[in-house]
Amino acid sequence: MFNTILFPIDHSREAREAAKTVANLAKTYHSRLIILSVVEPVKEGEISSPSHEFMTSPTAVSQLLLEAQTLFEQQGIKAEVLEKQGVPSFTICDVADETDADLIIMGSRGLGLTEQGVSESVANRVINLSPCPVLIVP
């Protein structure tokens, strides 16, 4: 049913919580698991929070992906990792399309909640743009 699961992660508590659901479904369906993290471009003159700065650092994102891959491997799940650059919501949907993902699983809020609120969050944009079903874990 879910041959390929895409799991976009950031450094948020919600992403860590979603990992439990990802592990459960990947084991149940013997799915190919792709862990994705998106390095966000730094906009000139933009004031960002420390959590946003984390996702603009390729070194920090690479370390995050390595830790996530290790976590899944400890549970007997082979996971591929992808690091991309771009706008998270669009990049997640592009990768889902490129990898023929059957399901995207992601945390409900993560670091992508904007000043405009939930309607402009990464999760909400992915729901609206995704080429496949999206499971949002609170």
Image: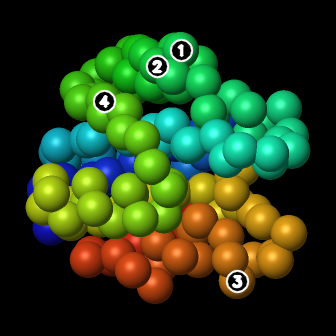
Instruction: Assess disc 3: are there few (<14), some (14-19) or many (≥20) residues with their C-alpha within 10 Å of its C-alpha.
Output: few
Q: Earlier in the sequence, mark 4 or mark 2?
A: 2
Q: Is residue 12 visible?
A: no
Give the percent coordinates (x, y) of residue 137: 59, 62
Q: CA distance from mark 1 to mark 2?
A: 5 Å
When asked about the image quadrant of residue 79, the answer is top left
Q: Earlier in the sequence, mark 1 or mark 4?
A: 1
Q: Are marks 1 and 2 in contact (CB under 8 Å)?
A: yes
Instruction: Assess disc 4: are there few (<14), some (14-19) or many (≥20) residues with their C-alpha within 10 Å of its C-alpha.
Output: some
Q: Earlier in the sequence, mark 3 or mark 2?
A: 2
Closest to the observer: 135 or 90?
A: 90
Tag shown at residue 62: 2
Q: Quadrant of the C terminus?
A: bottom right
Tag shown at residue 81: 4
**Amino acid marked by disc 1:** Thr
Q: CA distance from mark 4 to mark 3?
A: 28 Å
User: Which residue lies under the disc numbered 1?
Assistant: 59
As drawn, the residue found furthest toward the front would be 44
Q: Earlier in the sequence, mark 3 or mark 1?
A: 1
